[in-house]
Image (cartoon, rainbow, N blue to C red):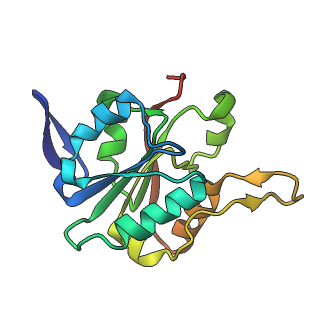
Amino acid sequence: METVKVGRHEIEMAFRPEESRLLILAWPDGRYRHEVASWSRLFPDENVVCVVERDTCVARNKAVRDFCMAAPPEVRHFVSIDADMRPEVAKTLPFLQAEADLVGCMYPTADHNLGAWADPAAVHCGLYRFNRRVVETVKLPWFTWDHQVAGCEFRCECIGFVEKVKAAGLSVARAGWCGHRDWR
């Protein structure tokens, strides 16, 4: 654990912000919530990147290709957050402290579908963190829109990514809570 100074407080984190990159996925127009801007102060300004693409899978894959795979070796951890998330340091602290190759933070999904979290191993990608081992092991595309078995609905792009990480023998964890849109 690393002790990080946040304002007047010190918090323990499983990674060093100066050795990490924060990816803000701000589709479709480059705007993001003030809570994301405030939370991004955990990271050095030069390590914060905003990715703007209309399609979520394209945005996530370009972020990985352009800002993770191309990152210098001293950048060892990556945090990705969607523009409509509402993080608070106190509620995301378990996420910041969890030890795993891929760590997801729980949040309310569309229409308060907390059933998306019914599986204790479920990780969705509104706020997630991964290390360089994931970048070096899992091949692109990380995210794709897959159809469910009957072909009548899309399967969340996060599920396929998490399956790829697990298939590569890497560890996956879920920790913490983050607000989302108008839901806390």
The correct choice, above or below, for 178 with respect to 29 in the image is: above
Q: Which residue is drawn at 57% across and 61% down?
A: 58
Task: Look at 49% across and 22% down and name the residue there.
Answer: 184
Give the camera-side residue of 55 and 124. 55
As drawn, 29 above or below 178: below
Task: Decide if residue 113 is in sight here.
Answer: no
Left or right of residue 18: residue 85: right
Q: Can residue 92 be seen in this view?
A: yes
Q: Which residue lies furthest to the front in this view?
A: 29
Q: In this view, does 79 lie above or below 62?
A: above
Left or right of 160, for residue 183: left
Question: Left or right of 162: which side holds 87?
Answer: left
Q: Residue 13: x percent and y percent?
A: 23, 46
Residue at point 33% right, 54% down?
99
Residue placed most toward the observer, 158 or 40: 40
**Residue 147: x and y, percent?**
79, 59
Near-viewer residue (54 or 182) = 54
x, y percentage for residue 183? 54, 23
Which of the 4 image quarters holds residue 87? top left
Looking at the picture, tell me which residue is in the foreground, 25 or 118: 25
